[in-house]
Image: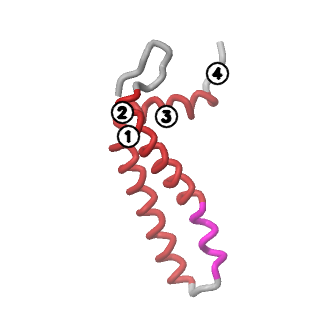
């Protein structure tokens, strides 16, 4: 994925980037909802199986998102997200 001078993604690969970003958002949402599974009124073994399945699907969606976004797109998103933790000079 190429970026212009101001860091904007070029239109050609913009669609794949957006699809990958949607998969990444769904993946993180599913991952952070896993603890809520244990509030469902089912047997603990079934809940554990559902939570494990959700965990595997979440990581699978993360891999699919990285494939769609490409290495450069993933690094762009990662840098934007982790920039809030960097110290300002």
Badge nearest the viewer, 1 or 4: 1
Q: Going by the image, does 4 lie left or right of 32?
A: left
Q: Earlier in the sequence, mark 4 or mark 3?
A: 3
* Foreground of the two, 78 or 18: 18
Q: Earlier in the sequence, mark 1 or mark 3?
A: 1
Measured as percent of width and height from the top left, residue 54 is found at 48, 66
Q: Going by the image, does 28 lie left or right of 87?
A: left
| Quarter of the C terminus within the rendering | top right
Label 2–label 1 contact, CB within 8 A: yes
Q: Quadrant of residue 67?
A: top left
**C-alpha separation, residue under disc 2 versus residue under disc 4:** 32 Å
Measured as percent of width and height from the top left, residue 55 is found at 47, 63
Check the image and report above or below for 84 versus 60.
Answer: above
Measured as percent of width and height from the top left, residue 25 is found at 53, 49
Badge nearest the viewer, 2 or 4: 2
> What residue is rendered at 61% in x and 25% in y?
86
**C-alpha separation, residue under disc 2 versus residue under disc 3:** 18 Å
Q: How many marks?
A: 4
Measured as percent of width and height from the top left, residue 29 is found at 57, 55
Q: Which residue carries the number 2 mark?
A: 13
Q: Going by the image, does 6 lie left or right of 42?
A: left
Q: Which mark is residue 78?
A: 3
Dot 2 alpha-carbon crowd within 10 angstroms: few under 14, some 14 to 19, many 20 or more = some
The span picked out in magenta is: 33-40
Q: Which residue carries the number 1 mark?
A: 16
Q: Which mark is residue 87?
A: 4
Check the image and report above or below for 58 versus 82.
Answer: below
> What residue is rendered at 51% in x and 76% in y?
48
Q: Is residue 51 magenta?
A: no
Label 1–label 4 contact, CB within 8 A: no
């Amino acid at each position: 994925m190429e970026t212009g001078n101001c860091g904007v993604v070029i239109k050609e690969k913009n669609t794949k980037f957006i699809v990958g970003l949607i998969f990444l958002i769904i993946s993180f949402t599913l991952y952070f909802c896993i603890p809520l599974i244990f509030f469902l009124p089912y047997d603990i073994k079934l809940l554990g199986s559902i939570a494990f399945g959700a965990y595997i699907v979440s990581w699978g969606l993360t891999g699919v998102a990285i494939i769609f976004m490409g290495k450069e797109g993933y690094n762009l998103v990662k840098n934007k997200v982790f920039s809030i933790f960097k110290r300002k000079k």
